[in-house]
Structure formats: structure tokens, C-alpha cells
Amino acid sequence: MKRAATTPKRTKRKESRAALRERTAEIVRRLRAEYPDARCSLDHQDAYQLLVATILSAQCTDERVNQVTPALFARYPDADALAGARTEELEALIRSTGFYRNKAKSLLGMAAALVERHGGRVPADMDALVKLPGVGRKTANVVLGNAFGMAAGVVVDTHVKRLSARLGLTAHTDPETIEADLMDIVAREDWTDLSHLFIYHGRAVCKAPKPRCAACVLADICPSSLV
């Protein structure tokens, strides 16, 4: 029996790296215009405060952290003071941020390491930062980018992870691999701002349960757009 002719399936043309970089630059440009005041949402006055706040922000909203840190910094204004904190008192101050026992342990270890290894000062160095208790690459990127103005990498939080996938900027789910993908296609001078812009857009428009594609300034260049 003669087989019926089949129509070849159309395959989506793969976006070249050059085109991807160009589209990514346009994404950054549009989001900058949409959120001109995008910045780090954790209130801080120096690298020490930002490091503490970022550790507290794990599994917690920035808004809640900002409610906790004024009293915390008044009680422990620097690493020396924090290193000498009583565990029970520290836990009580940070309890509302969740996982407070683990966070207190990280804060005490981090502060002690700063005093012992760096004279109580936060080092402006990725390798030194990630060796501190409770500090991973994401936290180090936050501190380096926002406290020291150093573009060492891209902060990948839940918003950045979600938007990067929806925008077709990565096919990976591991934060460090996503970061490497973004560092390859985003201009270095935009690395720090990119996370702020994605966080603002993720909160306002590209929300986790249901994105508001009809209100999105990126709808026409987003492969996941519903409009």
C-alpha cells in the first residue's frame, strides 16, 4: 500500500548568539526606561549592613528584612559587635525573617570570620567572600555589585531565574549555570542592574503564577508572550 505523503514539520530557527545578545540589550534598554529607579531593595548604608541583610533575605521578603535590620544594626553596628552577640538575643531580633536559628549561626560565623581574617571589614573580593560562613556566590554578587560597584557576576534569585527562562535567555535551571549564560550575553556594565530590573519587572508584571503579558513592554520580543 502506498504511503500518504507527509508534510515536513517546521522547526523553529535557532537564535544566533549575536541576535540573542542584541535582543538582550534591547530587553535591558526597555526595562531601564520602565523602571528608572530600580535598585537594591535591601536598605543598607555600607557593605557590612548589606552582607547581613542579604544573609537574612534567604527565604524571606526584602520588605520584612528591612523591618528587622534597623534594630539589628542599632544593636550590632559592625562585625566586631555582631561577633560578640549572644545567640539567644540575636535569634530574637531576627526571628521574623524565618529560619532564624540557621541565620543566626551564619551571621555569628560570618562576623567572627570578618574579625579574624579581615580586621572586621567586608572584603571586596569574590574568593574571600564565599569563604565566609553563610555566604555563597549569590550573596557575594549582591555585595560586590551594590556595595563596591564591582561587576563580578549576575545575581540569580527566583525572579531572575523565572524571567531568564521565559525570555529565552537560558535553557538551564541551575542558578550558577543561568548566571554563566547571562554573563555571556549581557554587557558587563549591565550585570548588576540586570537583576534589579528583572526583580522589579517580576514583581510588577512577569509574576510567577500568571504573567501580565498584555501590560509587558517586552511582549513583542519575548518567546513566552501570551499576546
Image (cartoon, grey):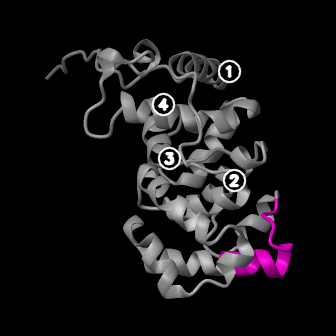
Mark 2: few/some/many CA within 10 Å (<14, 14-19, 20+): many
Circles 4 and 1, Cβ within 8 Å, touching? The answer is no
Q: Estimate the spatial distance between the alpha carbons at disc 3 and disc 2, rounded to whole Å.
A: 25 Å
Q: Which residue is the site of mark 3?
A: 172
Of the numbered discs in the image, which one, if any, rests on residue 143?
A: 2
Q: Magenta part of the protein: which range?
A: 110-123
In the displayed structure, 211 sits above or below 146; it is: above
Q: Estimate the spatial distance between the alpha carbons at disc 4 and disc 3, rounded to whole Å.
A: 10 Å
Residue at 60% from the left image edge and 34% from the top image edge? 194
Q: Secondary structure at mark 2?
A: helix
Horizontal relation, residue 94 to residue 47: left or right: left
Quadrant, the C terminus: top left
| Comparing labels 2 and 1, the label whose residue is closer to the camera | 2
Answer yes or no: is residue 166 visible: no
> Which image quarter: residue 121?
bottom right
Where's residue 119, x and y in %? Answer: 86, 74
Of the numbered discs in the image, which one, if any, rests on residue 163?
A: none
Residue at 69% from the left image edge and 45% from the top image edge? 146
Horizontal relation, residue 43 to residue 208: left or right: right
| Residue type, numbered disc 4 | Gly
Q: Which residue is the site of mark 4?
A: 168
**Total numbered circles:** 4
